[in-house]
Image (spheres, helix red, strand yellow):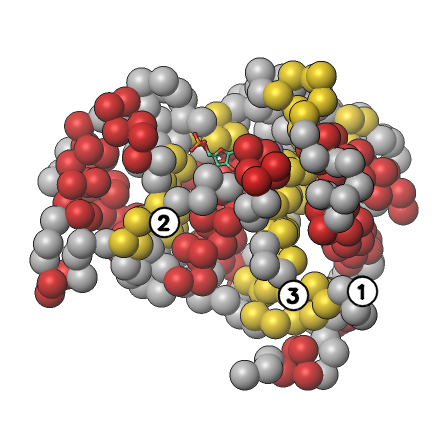
Amino acid sequence: MISDGVRTGMTLETFIMEGMLGSPAATGVFTSLLNQIGYAAKLVTSKVRRAGLANVLGATEQVNVQGERVMKLDEEANDTLLGTLRRRGHCAAVASEELEHIEHFTDDARARYVVLFDPLDGSSNIDVNISIGTIFGVLRRDEDSLQVGEKDFLKPGKELAAAGYVIYGSSTMLVLSTGREKGVHGFTYDPTVGEFLLSHENIRIPEKGSTYSINEGNFGRWTDGVKRWNAHLKAEDKADGRPYGMRYVGTLVADAHRTLLRGGVFAYPADTKSPEGKLRLLYEANPFAFLFEAAGGSATDGQRRILDVVPTKLHQRTGLVLGSKRDVELFEEFAQGKR
Ligand code: AHG
Ligand code: MN
Ligand code: MN
């Protein structure tokens, strides 16, 4: 069935502007910033859709701060976000997976926000035509922040003003939340109109799902708790809906998107190879934790709520478990040795 948003042509831009009308104190700055992110997503999707034709597949000679090979599309997406966010004067600085340090735009007090992003998530899937994405989070600068610096980024995820992602899948979708009380909304890109249209209003994740998503090749590196949790999900128990099905794309955006819409659990726990976890707290884990909680789900590292973690480093890593409330609770019980 066609959604009301699509039928009435509710674009991302209109949706954000109408949201602003509900907050009398709003100045339009936040709205304008979110619109710039939507615009960046259009530019990136146009590159992704032509990737096999426009000589943007493959790797560059660069290795990023994480020690990973930089793909051409990583670089293109990063440049696009830098270029669009630098304009309009609302964004004081950005942090990116692809930049060792923050990129400073301006100290002007009118630039009230900073933005964090993973410009291209799922790099290993670019050249094999599997879904990839972009992840972003928006933080408000402190009122007394005269000079923007790393401190403006080292905030727990619960302080995010907005978070979202773009999935370049069978269609391109942008999923956004500006807070728990505002809900989570999905917009599908209509390339013939050149707009994101509201297709998934007020996304709510089911209380419990029937799939788990994890790189099971890491089995030997997991803690005993994670191994027992994994065995539990695979054990037959019809009344409890087990065994769970297994789905793993290897692109966080794709695995999290499916989990958000269908329920279940995604896990990339800390293990002996990545004792701090593999995924990055500021621009991968936090935006998703924010979205999942706003949709009625949860996010943990096994011991702590992700959104409470106070970061000390820009590229800090974390274990990440996202999903339906009951499925994330179950993981925590095993991880904490309660089962
Ligand atoms: P990125 O491409 O931004 O470096 O992120 C890759 C991440 C994430 O998308 C995914 O969930 C995870 O790496 C997959 O890791 P494994 O290949 O170890 O399963
Ligand atoms: Mn990533
Ligand atoms: Mn990336």
Q: Is mark 1 within 8 Å of ligand 3?
A: no
Using the numbered discs, state the Cα–Cα distance from disc 3 to disc 2 in whole angstroms: 23 Å
Residue that appears at 31% across and 28% down? 218
Position in image of residue 82 (x %, y %): 80, 36
**Residue 321 shows in this picture:** yes
Q: Is mark 3 within 8 Å of ligand 1?
A: no
Q: Quadrant of residue 4?
A: bottom right
**The residue tagged with tag 2: helix, strand or loop?**
loop
Q: Is residue 258 above or below residue 67?
A: below
Binning the other alpha carbons within 10 Å of mark 1 as few (below 14), some (14 to 19) or many (20 upward) gives: few
Residue under label 1:
194
Q: Nearer the viewer, residue 322 or 73?
A: 73
Which circle's residue, 1 or 2, is located before the other in the chain? Answer: 1
Using the numbered discs, state the Cα–Cα distance from disc 1 to disc 2 in whole angstroms: 32 Å
Q: Is residue 19 above or below residue 317?
A: below
**Residue 155 shows in this picture:** no
Q: Amino acid at mark 3?
A: Thr
Residue that lies at the very extreme toward the front in this rendered image: 53
Q: How many marks?
A: 3
Residue under label 3:
188
Quadrant showing the N terminus? bottom right
- Which of the four quarters of the rendered structure image does ligand 3 lie in? top right
Residue that appears at 59% across and 45% down? 129
Residue under label 2:
247
Q: Amino acid at mark 2?
A: Arg
